[in-house]
Image (cartoon, helix red, strand yellow):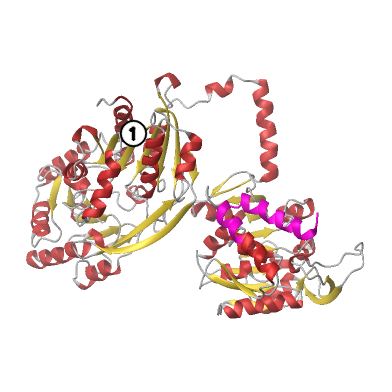
Amino acid sequence: MPVLGSLYSQAVDELIEDGVNGWRFYPDHDGGARSALDHIFHLKETEADAMREAARQSIRHLTPEFAAQCFVRAIRLALDGVRA
Amino acid sequence: MSASMAHFLNTVVQITRSDSVGFIPGISKHLNWQLRKALRLFPCELRISGSVMAVDQPGGVAALVNAMGEYDFNNMQLLRLLLSKGNRTFVDVGANIGSYSLIASETPNAKVVSIEPHPRTFGALVENIRKNKRQNVTCLNLALSQQEGVLELTNLRESSINRIVSPREAPGPTTWVQAKPFHAVCNELGITPDFIKIDVEGHEREVLDGFGEWESRAKIIFIEGGERATVRDWMHRAGFEGPYFFQFKRYQLGAEKQARPEDPIFVHKSFLPQLQSFGIRIGPPLLEADRRNSQVTAVRAVDDTRSVDAVPETCPAPRDRIPVKAILLTNCVTPYTLPVWQKLTSSLMSLRLLLSTPMETDRDWERNWDGLDVKVQRSLYARRNRKHEQGFTVTDHLHFPYDSLPLLFRYSPDVVISAQLGFRTLQAVLFRMVRRRSRLVVLVDGSEHTEKGIGPIRTQWRRTLLRAADAVVVIGASGARYLERIGIPSSKIIQAFQATDPTSFYQIPLRKSAEAAKRLLYVGRLIEGKGLEYFVEELSDWLERIRARPASCGLLGMDRCEASFNSCQSRGVWKSGSSATFPTTSFQSITGKRMSASSRPWPTLGAS
């Protein structure tokens, strides 16, 4: 970490915030990845540490329990017609 | 009852219990076979797996092959799996007309030795091997026994029941055949047998007694009559565990016989860990399971309260669960969905998973269904390559689980969760329409990018299915945007996310040394659709510009996109010794070791 990721990936699109926990780019766009590499290899040590911490924090809630609860919400919605 | 009627009914019973064919297609083929017999339309050709089998008369295994194809479905699947794991040798003792030998020899790297004593049956065996142009099979016209000599063999028209004549046997037509011990055959051919099938109509113990120095060197033995004490004693003395029965759809070796019983299996103790590494779960063998069950029953009788205390603490109390009986229809259980389905199971009154396949063929993951109630469906499979809008080729693995609807009516769930927008969801929609009190949740894991280029007909198909759903779960906002764009109201969309257990990653320290901070790690499938080559090109240009290079590059993932590897090397992205590739399935398996200092994973560079 930090993370470089393609904007074609749904997970990257959702979870990566430019300059906060990584950089996103379009892999088939000229210069996209180079710009991300420039950013990531010119980070100061303290900045890199902060981004690593931010990366870890940004996915801390994405546990199997959380995902299962999304399905529970969907089941409740289907049963009651009401969004939980 | 006449013998032919008894044969007919026996095959019908076997079809009803078969794991390889549905009742209607099996019976149709069997009736067709009766017609062929009545009209004497022999010889004929049958198909078994990817091979052709010539049959010059009815009866024997031919009727089974005709009706069921791979009639010993579970054992034949296991044999195919075992032979696919490297250059292995299979010895088929009592090969008959070659059904096991043909299936084994479909694996090009396998070496097959087919041994059949009856001269006429041996002729049919050789003809079948020749017809299929199998270069990796050696056929021997021999009987195996404990010592060299000649043996008297029955000479019945029904080839599958010819056997070595015992002294107590009533007189009948016989022939004399040459016999050798197993060890002599192995030494003469210079082979080291890995897997052996023995089907010799009661002569099994004599065959085993001829193993000599080879008795503990085989890995797996499929053996008819393996429950008999004489066979079990020999096996246990030679270091084998068993008898087991293999359930392919559960990927499990255990005490439970198949619905249509197949030959028992013995596994050498030294090979058990390797079997487990293939993802096969191993329970207690037949007789040990019986012993353990009786012990458990005894313990329960003494202390009945202990079983209540044994309920895992993490399992919510029954009153906290949603009181619904749910069915989940999906392809397979992946390592990252396993904990999600486990948690969901503990949130509902009941959750049963109906899977189209135990595991996708292009994934190397171990099957793990711990804590889940799983049934593998009857399903047809097709693979299709299509061009993505961005030019790369995507391989779709298509499953058609054709028994979803009957199973849904049988289980009668309150809620059906159906993954993807294909055949299984169509059946779930039909169930929802008929059982109006049931509810349907559809899981859609696509995004705006992955669904690019979907034509108007497929879009309309999806719209129709989703309008019948009571709720739709998507994996992220991009998926939700895609559905809204095709007309699905946002009020019925719930956003979920792919999740994993993050705790195993927390052991990795966040602070990095300056050197470690220059490591690059790619994590994702090594396939064209991930866009790795684009990235490598950009990385290469960037390195040339700054005249530096990262300390190391790693590629971690399944499959192997040769183009990506070659591109990395030809563009000088890594020097010799500075790169690392881990074509593995488990990130956790290396995080604590080789990557412990630090890494910069970029989890994906594109989308398939």
Query: Start and end of the magenta stretch?
Result: B1-29
**In the picture shown, does residue B576 fall above or below B279?**
below
Secondary structure of the residue carrying tag 1 is helix
Quick one: A53 or B256, which is closer to the camera? B256
Tell me if B17 is positioned left or right of B229 in this view: left
Locate residue B567, reporting x and y percent: 22, 70
The image quarter containing residue A26 is bottom left
Identify the image quadrant of the C terminus of chain B. Answer: bottom left
Q: Residue at x 18, y 71 (%)?
A: B571
Q: Is residue B250 above or below residue B141?
A: above
Q: Nearer the viewer, residue B390 or B485?
A: B485
Between B468 and A17, the residue placed more toward the observer is B468
On screen, residue B107 versus residue B119, left or right, reads left
Q: Is residue B22 magenta?
A: yes
Reading the image, the residue beneath label 1 is A68
Q: Is residue B428 above or below residue B39?
A: above
Q: Is residue B498 visible?
A: no
The kind of residue on which mark 1 rests is Ala
Binning the other alpha carbons within 10 Å of mark 1 as few (below 14), some (14 to 19) or many (20 upward) gives: many
**Residue at x 26% of width, y 41% of height:** B474
Q: Where is residue B26 drawn, in percent x and y?
A: 59, 56
**Is B528 placed left or right of B132 in the picture?**
left
The answer to whether residue B202 is visible is yes
Quarter of the figure that contains the N terminus of chain B: bottom right
Q: Residue A64: image x %, image y %?
A: 33, 36
Residue shown at 63% from the left, 60% from the top: B30
Q: Is residue B239 above or below residue B322?
A: below
Residue at image x 78%, y 50%?
B229
Nearer the observer, A76 or B239:
A76
Q: Position of residue B529 (x, y in %)?
A: 25, 60
**Quadrant of res B325:** top left
What secondary structure do most residues of the magenta stretch adopt?
A: helix
